[in-house]
Image: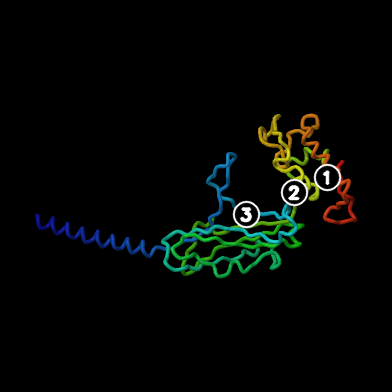
Amino acid sequence: MNKIMKLCTSIFVIVMFYSCNQDIDRFDNADNYIYFNMPFVLNQYGKETSVRQDSLSYSFALDDISVTSYVFKIPINTVGLAHSQERTYRVEVVADSSNVTDADWDKSCIENLTVKRDSLRDTLYVKVFRSEKIRSQWCHIVFRLLPNENFQLGDEKLLTAKISFSDILTPPDWWNKWQGVFGDFCREKFVKWQEIYYLGADPNVETIGGPGLGKPLYWDNMPYYAMSSWYPSTFMFVRIMKQYFIDNEVYPDGDTSKPRVLLP
């Protein structure tokens, strides 16, 4: 009986040893997966949620005219073991979901992509240009990861990444409330207001209400009400801007066929 028990034990040990070796082999030869590590959406308190952003966007609208390009940084993650050598990976543009030409971006950015040695991460740098086209429309590029000899594809939801960019300036949320003071929205007014009513120009804080309560007043934290009797310091800066456009002939987009930029 003891011999039978010893024999069974020996067989069990051999089987377990073989199984463990098989598991180690499977681990050592495990597939490596790759995916776009897009940022998580933030909640109202600025904390990360479990939902990822589906795209990254950028607007040149408030940049100085000398700014002609921008570089998106799309994070790439891999799952598996780091390697002692660089590993190439592949990305393609999803043509039917993109609307760019060679004049809008540097397409060489998706060539010769590698995850560096001893690393599990990379960044896809995408350079886009401030072309004439984006003054009237948003440009979109959708990238898709492809499998190769180094990487299989990860979670299906994380295989594409979208970037969007434009040079279209949209009014800030507070403009409608202040339209009676500033008039119709245009780039020239908005840029000049940022120059005049910068953070620190007005020593006062919002004391009446709104989401900016207790915070300094400036162009991105406008008074909750557009009333000169309640916010005399803000209206002092408004008068400065009004006088600027009286003293200087400024036209929307430099087009002299349009009416001059003036405040009411």
- Ranked by sequence position, the earlier of labels 1 and 3 is 3
- Up-down relation of residue 12 to residue 174 (above or below): below
- For badge 1, the amino acid type reads Asp
- Ranked by sequence position, the earlier of labels 2 and 1 is 2
Give the distance between the C-alpha atoms of the residues marked 2 and 1, in whole angstroms: 12 Å
Q: Position of residue 189 (x, y in %)?
A: 80, 47
Q: Residue at x 50, y 68 (%)?
A: 88
Q: Which residue is mark 1?
A: 184
The type of colouring in the image is rainbow
Number of the label disc, if any, that sits on residue 56: 3
Mark 1–mark 3 contact, CB under 8 Å?
no
- For badge 3, the amino acid type reads Leu
Q: What SS does tag 1 mark?
A: loop
Please indicate whether residue 146 sits to the left or right of residue 72 in the image. left
Q: Which residue is mark 2?
A: 170
Give the distance between the C-alpha atoms of the residues marked 1 and 3, in whole angstroms: 29 Å
Number of the label disc, if any, that sits on residue 216: none
Q: Position of residue 232 (x, y in %)?
A: 79, 32
Q: Position of residue 12 (x, y in %)?
A: 20, 58
